[in-house]
Amino acid sequence: MSERISREELVKVYNIEITFFDELVDSGLLSIQTENEIRYLMYEDLPVFEKFANWHYDLEINLPGLEVIHDMLQKMDELKQKNRELMNKLSAINKHKEG
């Protein structure tokens, strides 16, 4: 089983409000596992959680702002991937024309 941290422990370690964690989960920004009514965040998802916590507490970005930023960053990643694919196709076409 993958390593995980309970919501209660996460709140203590990161000194955040439990409602902030719950709002991230409710909005779909964080995925959790529930076992025996205890909510867990997988260790592999900690960087995402830390990013949201930093944006919220350090930059004072509210939940709707976090959702917008997250959505925009995902779209940017998709566009970067599409751009790489198109550049590879263009490169292949140019090699074919030269060869």
Image (spheres, helix red, strand yellow):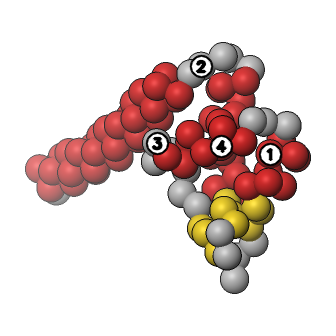
> Mark 4 or mark 3, which has the lower sequence index?
4
Q: Residue at x 84, y 55 (%)?
A: 9
Alpha-carbon distance for marks 2 and 4? 14 Å
Alpha-carbon distance for marks 3 and 1? 18 Å
Asked whether the beta carbons under mark 3 and mark 1 sit within 8 Å of each other, the answer is no
What amino acid is labelled 2 in the image?
A: Ile
Alpha-carbon distance for marks 4 and 1? 8 Å
What amino acid is labelled 4 in the image?
A: Phe
Asked whether the beta carbons under mark 4 and mark 1 sit within 8 Å of each other, the answer is yes
Alpha-carbon distance for marks 2 and 3? 15 Å
Instruction: Please state, as top left, top right, bottom left or bottom right, where the N terminus lies in the image.
Output: bottom right
Q: Where is residue 2 in the image (x, y as percent from the top left)?
A: 70, 76
> Mark 4 or mark 1, which has the lower sequence index?
1
For label 4, the residue is 21
For label 2, the residue is 61
Q: Where is residue 21 in the image (x, y as percent from the top left)?
A: 65, 43
Q: Is mark 1 on a helix, strand or loop?
A: helix
Query: Is residue 88 shown left or right of residue 31?
Result: left
Closer to us: mark 1 or mark 2? 1
> Mark 1 or mark 2, which has the lower sequence index?
1
Query: Is residue 75 shown left or right of residue 2?
Result: left
Circle number at residue 11: 1
Circle number at residue 27: 3
Assess disc 3: are there few (<14), some (14-19) or many (≥20) residues with their C-alpha within 10 Å of its C-alpha: few
> Mark 2 or mark 4, which has the lower sequence index?
4
